[in-house]
Amino acid sequence: MFNVKKKTNWFLTIFVSIWVIGLIFIIGVISYGLITTPSRIDDLIAVLIFMILIAFLAIDYLRWQLRGQEIIIFDEAKIEIKNSGTFFTSRTIINYFEAENIEPDTDEDTPKLIKFWGIGGGKIKIEYLGRRKRFGQDLTPKEAERIGKEMKLEIERRK
């Protein structure tokens, strides 16, 4: 089992935190308006629901920045890669016989904007069934090399 912790991007974390505080203030103003003037419910309820949804997603992003980690678990017959530290966890399961290649990679495929926001990409690439799964966004090349080798050995041992 490997735990790859997310390194916090403090610039983005502070920016999104300030943005969420402002959004919560706006949600409070709209809610107060709806309570004091119920005749406006038809006009503002969709806006309020949309803002609450956006605030929820932004808070989830903050949780990923502050507590996020990618967990790689080796089971009897499969590798499980999952994200934790967020409300929405993603999980990828790869059977050992499906894994074609594991290697450190510079990740030129993922758009820079996605990598900047920390929501995609990675320094280790697993190829399986014609697909690619990347993880380890914040690994150094040395760490990616070490983890990639250890994972490759573990898969070879279990095949």
Image: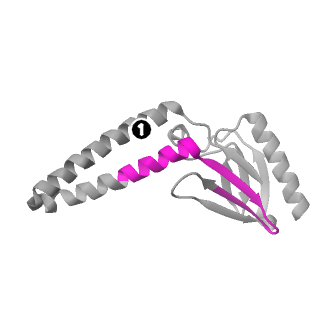
Kind of element beneath mark 1: helix
Asked if residue 90 lies left or right of residue 136, the reply is left
Asked if residue 143 lies left or right of residue 20, the reply is right
Is 62 or 47 nearer to us in this picture? 62
Residue 95 position, x and y percent, is 76, 67
Q: Residues within 10 Å of mark 1 (few under 14, many from 20)?
A: some
Relative to 20, does residue 38 appear above or below in the rendering?
below
Q: Quadrant of residue 81?
A: bottom right
Relative to 121, does residue 93 appear above or below in the rendering?
below
Q: Residue at x 64, y 42 (%)?
A: 137
Q: Which residue is mark 1?
A: 17
Q: Residue at x 42, y 34 (%)?
A: 15
Callout 1, which amino acid?
A: Ser
User: In the picture, which quadrant includes the C terminus?
Assistant: bottom right
Q: Is residue 65 magenta?
A: yes
Relative to 115, does residue 1 appear above or below in the rendering?
below
User: In the picture, which quadrant includes the N terminus?
Assistant: bottom right
Q: Is residue 32 magenta?
A: no
Residue 119 position, x and y percent, is 54, 46
Q: Which residues are magenta?
A: 54-82
Is 93 or 35 nearer to us in this picture? 35
Q: Residue at x 37, y 42 (%)?
A: 20
Is 44 or 123 nearer to us in this picture? 44
